[in-house]
Structures are given as C-alpha cells and as structure tokens.
C-alpha cells in the first residue's frame, strides 16, 4: 500500500507565538483519565474487523489496510530533536496525516489560540470510470500517542459509501482530568468525495500577446514534466486535457494571472481513486 505521509508542523515556528498556551499531553498516561480520542477518518478500500494499529516509521503511518486517511496528529519532540524545548508548552507539534489521494490544495490544520480545537478537511478524488467502494473508519489516538482505526458501524453493519457529492462533517470533543486540572480538546474533520475523469494527456499551446502560437507540446499523463517553462515572449498558455471518458477540458493561464500551476487528475496507486498533479508554471524573468 502507498505510504501515508504526516506533515508535522512546529507550533512556535509555523503557527506563531499565539500557540504558547497550548496545553501539552502528560507523558505519564496513568495520570490521565481520558478515553481513546477520535482524531479523524480513514477510508478503507477493504473491509476489516477489529482494530488496526498504525505502524509508525518516522513521519509515516501504515494501518496495514489500503485506504485514505484524514486525521490530526499530535507529536511530542524528543530531547535532541529540532524544536525540543525544556518548556513543555512549546514541545509539541500539530500536524495532519494524509495521503496523495486527498486533495492538498488548501489542506491545513487550524488550531485556535488555546490549543484545544483542531480543524482539518479535504477532498477524496474518485475515478469516474472506475469507482471504488470506500469503507468509513474512525481514527483514534490513545493516551500513549498511538493511532488505530475501526470500521464505523451503521445498524450493526460496516458502512460503505461511493459516489460523487457525498460528504462527512463531524466534530467531537474529549474531556479529561490531569493532575486535578480539567482539560478538553475538540476535533473537527470535513471530508467530501468528488469525482473526476482521469487525464490521459495534455496539449499545451504557448502564445504571445497577439495570440500567435509560439510552441505546441503534448505530454502523456505518465510522462509529465516537473515544470512548464514558457518560451520567450509568451504571455498566454492554453492547456487542453484529454480525459479517459473522451471529453476534453481546456484552461487558460496568463503570465500575470493568479493561477501558478496546471492541475491534472491522474490515476492513483489505489484502484478506483485519483490524485491531483499540479505542474508549476515558469514564465521566466518578468513573467507573472
């Protein structure tokens, strides 16, 4: 299965000093009275029974089941690691564990000033030509910081969803006592299923200010360049995407426009799903 990537974000460095009041987890789990905490979703491509704990290797999480995760991570820095502080209030990072099949455009974790509310969301991209059956699972975090998944149950049966337009939005709060102090955390996760046809090829036409074509190039979806570099005097790019369902999608990009990349949806390593591919635009000196 494709490895899942967790993006660890240092509070003080990335989110700013407003997170100095983040309430850290206690290292001694026996001092806590919290139950396992819900932190998000995992959409499994194969049904399973019982709990599946994540095998963690650095910043990677693998539940042993192919699927798509959208959940919050809370990680303590260890002594000697970058970001470690003797002050525990600064000694934690908040991140997200997502895979390439979750749309990264705008994907982020929002944390409020008190460090007790987290929000995360994104889109799961379905292949319109070969839809996958997604089994909704919950991700939990133990007091020791371990993550596991369980299939959601509806009327005693494992739930499965498939189809464009379906969405999940859920908020859960956890409360516990630690050293006589009452603590709480709220996690909100919003996930939508969207449907696209996979791009098979893209034709690029670069034009000057008089709309004369300076160059025309075609790439297949499995041989896309890392960057699209404009020829000299180009101010306009017209991209025509040939899709697997026979349709053609066109987009126009200008040197002074806000869009800085061409987006395509290409097959994923997970059958029935797609992932987005953004190719940066390089307009050269003075472009954009």
Image (tube, rainbow, N blue to C red):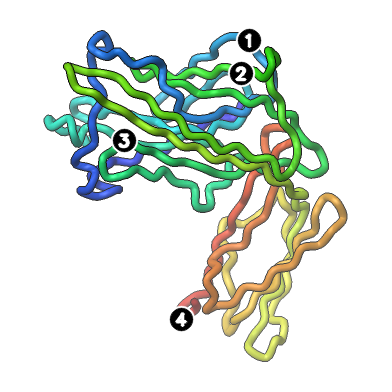
Quickly name the residue at label 1: 49
Mark 2 to mark 3 CA distance (whole Å): 26 Å
The answer to which of marks 2 and 4 sits earlier in the sequence is 2
* First along the sequence among labels 3 and 4: 3
- Outermost residue, left direction? 86
Q: Are marks 2 and 4 in contact (CB under 8 Å)?
A: no
Quote the CA–CA distance across marks 1 and 4.
Answer: 58 Å
Question: Could you give the CA–CA distance between mark 2 and mark 4, rounded to whole angstroms?
Answer: 53 Å
Q: Which residue is mark 4?
A: 286
Reading the image, the residue beneath label 3 is: 116
Question: Which residue is located at x 67 percent, y 73 percent?
Answer: 252
Residue linked to disc 2:
151
Position of 111 compared to 218: left or right? left
Camera-nearest label, 1 or 4: 1
Q: Quadrant of residue 41?
A: top right
Q: Quadrant of residue 164?
A: top right
Q: Position of residue 92 (x, y in %)?
A: 26, 32
In this view, the residue in front, 119 or 109, is 119
Tag in front: 2 or 3: 3
Which residue is depicted at the point 43% across and 41% down?
Answer: 119
In terms of secondary structure, where does tag 4 sit?
loop
- Mark 3, Cα crowd under 10 Å, few <14 / some 14-19 / many 20+, is some
């Amino acid at each position: 299965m494709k490895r899942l990537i967790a993006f660890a974000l240092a509070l003080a460095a990335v989110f700013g000093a407003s997170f100095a009041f983040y309430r850290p987890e206690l290292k001694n789990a026996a001092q806590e009275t919290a139950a396992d905490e819900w932190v998000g979703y995992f959409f499994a491509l194969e049904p399973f029974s019982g709990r599946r704990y994540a095998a963690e290797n650095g910043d990677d999480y693998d539940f042993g089941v192919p699927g798509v995760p959208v959940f919050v991570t809370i990680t303590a820095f260890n002594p000697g690691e970058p970001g470690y502080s003797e002050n525990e209030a600064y000694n934690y990072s908040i991140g997200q564990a997502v895979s390439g099949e979750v749309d990264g455009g705008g994907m982020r974790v929002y944390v409020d000033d008190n460090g007790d509310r987290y929000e995360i969301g994104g889109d799961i991209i379905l292949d319109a030509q070969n839809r996958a059956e997604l089994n909704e699972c919950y991700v939990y975090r133990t007091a020791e910081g371990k993550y596991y998944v369980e299939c959601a149950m509806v009327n005693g049966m494992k739930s499965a969803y498939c189809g464009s337009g379906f969405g999940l939005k859920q908020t859960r709060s956890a409360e516990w006592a630690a050293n006589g102090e009452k603590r709480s955390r709220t996690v909100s996760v919003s996930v939508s299923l969207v449907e696209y046809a996979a791009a098979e090829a893209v034709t690029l036409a670069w034009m000057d200010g008089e709309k004369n074509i300076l160059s025309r190039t075609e790439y297949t979806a499995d041989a896309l360049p890392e960057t699209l570099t404009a020829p000299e005097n180009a101010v306009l790019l017209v991209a025509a995407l040939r899709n697997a369902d026979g349709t053609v999608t066109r987009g126009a990009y200008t040197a002074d426009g806000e869009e800085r990349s061409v987006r395509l949806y290409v097959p994923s390593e997970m059958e029935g799903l797609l992932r987005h591919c953004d190719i940066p635009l390089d307009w050269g000196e003075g472009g954009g």
